[in-house]
Image (cartoon, coloured by chain):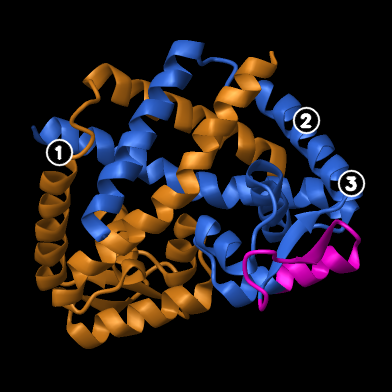
Chain colours: A orange, B blue
Amino acid sequence: MNDKGAALYEVLRQVRPLVLNSARAVEASLRPERLTVGMRAVLEVLAEHGPAPVPAVAERLDLARQGVQRHVNDLIDLGHVVAKENPAHRRSVLITLTPAGAELFDRIREDELKTLAGLAADCTPAEIAAALKVLTALNRDVRRRTA
Amino acid sequence: MNDKGAALYEVLRQVRPLVLNSARAVEASLRPERLTVGMRAVLEVLAEHGPAPVPAVAERLDLARQGVQRHVNDLIDLGHVVAKENPAHRRSVLITLTPAGAELFDRIREDELKTLAGLAADCTPAEIAAALKVLTALNRDVRRRTA
């Protein structure tokens, strides 16, 4: 019983440094595009889920609305997204990728997948699948405890 | 090749929400002790590695020195740590757990392990071990890229 607790403790210990260090790595790779990690995260939500109002993007990212609004403003300045009228709500706008923004995100994603494919060379696909299963289960259970 | 990149991408996607949500869960459990997640992290370093000066604690935690100094001050106020003269460096001090601080951390750790043992009930010890292996490998390789 306590062995399992200790094993999961070791797993959780790895996640915080991994978040910090992978954010640094992503940040460095985005610098030539004048993007931050936050701006990249907004592009990703729009690429995967389509146009959305700022509060919906913020909720998906677990980020404050004002922070997301700042990222959106910066992305508008760079021409990667536009604010379009929301047919469902006259007083809100939908943030939408421009073709240039969509293309940029595709390129970023492809580069990232190439980089990732070269990491953890000593791990098998089965081990990586197990890692995903364990992390997904932990997310589910930890979220349940904080709800 | 790209399958592996995509699989690791899914793994990395789980880690940020897990860090956020487990910090929230730990925070809630520490509130009755008047501790924050940061103060708990300082206690943990001292419990595992023994007395240390503030900059050494900050480095282990990947946190700013001033933040750690604040946590240490709060822990001193609660009687969980004391600053002792450093025999090796006359001008620096070693932060040291008090017996009460050591006892508190043991209790916190035990409670956490009990809670953790109840999570991810659908995962086997082998899957958890694989998760630890993959995360450790990712940490090693991502850190190498940012160094």
Disc 2 crowd, CA 10 A, few/some/many (<14, 14-19, 20+): some
Pick whichever, A116 or A139, lies toward us: A116
Compared across the picture, whether B36 is left or right of A68 comes to right
Give percent across and percent down for residue A72: 34, 78
Q: Residue at x 10, y 72 (%)?
A: A100
Compared across the picture, whether B43 is left or right of A128 comes to right
Disc 1: which residue: A117
Disc 3: which residue: B99
Give the Cα separation between the discs numbered 2 and 1: 38 Å
Callout 2 and callout 1 share a chain: no
Q: Which residue is drawn at 46% across and 32% down?
A: A135
**Label 2 chain ID:** B
* Element type where label 3 sits in the image: helix
* Element type where label 2 sits in the image: helix
Q: Are marks 2 and 3 in contact (CB under 8 Å)?
A: no
Q: Do the residues labelled 1 and 3 touch (CB within 8 Å)?
A: no
Callout 1 and callout 3 share a chain: no
**Label 1 chain ID:** A
Compared across the picture, whether B87 is left or right of A80 comes to right
Q: Is residue B82 magenta?
A: yes
- Check disc 1 and give the amino acid type: Ala
Q: Which residue is drawn at 28% across and 17% down?
A: A126
Disc 2: which residue: B110
